[in-house]
Image (tube, rainbow, N blue to C red):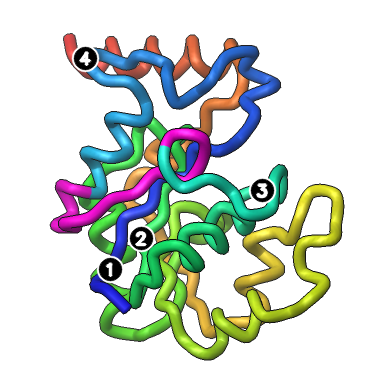
């Protein structure tokens, strides 16, 4: 096992967006570059990309849990700090808070009403969840909520709720671009 591993979830189909969200440009960076930089700015020395770019899914189209499982199996980290590629307003402060509380409590830590981003310690509870032989036989795969119900976890408050604004559609992307440009002025 290695130290905490940064994980960018970027393996979705982006079907509602109509183009790969990871390649969308916000300012001088793509969303993939922003998420990777965010994790590195949290002090993580190693960051991997779950999806087509780097760590391919062992079970295709099984959602975020399938991506997490694939990273776990291929990298064997002691813990993971996981961010989806489609949260462009997420801050280093927000994600660092998850990591700090998670390391101290040795629990999965996430923000209330949002299962991602997520600090996930790899322990017996997590290994037992992924050891279930029929885990990936569902059409869309298990949900993160399902996983959290079976492992020690804690939901915490976030200071700035807009940090968790998700980008799935062209209209949401337009709103993010407007918000980003307004903050830069």
Is the Cβ of the residue at disc 1 closer than 8 Å to that at disc 2? yes
Identify the residue shown where x is 32% and y is 78%.
1
**Figure quadrant of residue 130:** bottom right
**Closer to the eye: label 4 or 1:** 1
Identify the residue shown where x is 36% and y is 30%.
32
For marks 1 and 3 on the same chain, the one whose residue lies earlier in the sequence: 1
CA–CA distance in space, label 4 to label 1: 28 Å
Q: Which residue is mark 4?
A: 28
For marks 4 and 1 on the same chain, the one whose residue lies earlier in the sequence: 1
Residue 156 x/y as whole percent: 42, 67
Q: Which residue is mark 2?
A: 81
Q: Which residue is mark 3?
A: 63
**Closer to the eye: label 1 or 2:** 1
CA–CA distance in space, label 2 to label 4: 24 Å
Q: Secondary structure at mark 4?
A: loop
Crowdedness near tag 4: few (<14), some (14–19) or many (≥20) residues, C-alpha within 10 Å: few
Residue 178 x/y as whole percent: 38, 10
For marks 2 and 4 on the same chain, the one whose residue lies earlier in the sequence: 4
Q: Which residue is mark 1?
A: 4
């Amino acid at each position: 096992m290695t130290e905490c591993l940064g994980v960018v979830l970027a393996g979705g189909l982006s079907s509602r967006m109509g183009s790969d969200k990871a390649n969308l440009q916000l300012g001088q960076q793509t969303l993939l570059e922003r998420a990777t930089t965010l994790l590195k700015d949290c002090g993580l020395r190693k960051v991997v990309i779950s999806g087509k770019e780097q760590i391919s899914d062992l079970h295709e189209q099984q959602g975020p849990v399938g991506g997490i499982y694939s990273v776990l199996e291929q990298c064997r980290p002691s813990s993971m700090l996981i961010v989806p590629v489609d949260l462009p307003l997420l801050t280093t402060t927000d994600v660092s808070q998850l990591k700090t509380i998670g390391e101290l409590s040795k629990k999965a830590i996430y923000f209330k009403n949002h299962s991602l981003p997520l600090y996930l310690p790899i322990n017996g509870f997590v290994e037992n969840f992924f050891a279930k032989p029929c885990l990936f036989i569902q059409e869309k795969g298990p949900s993160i909520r399902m996983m959290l119900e079976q492992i020690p976890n804690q939901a915490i408050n976030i200071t700035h709720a807009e940090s968790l604004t998700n980008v799935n559609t062209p209209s949401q992307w337009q709103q993010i671009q407007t918000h980003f440009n307004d903050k830069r002025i």
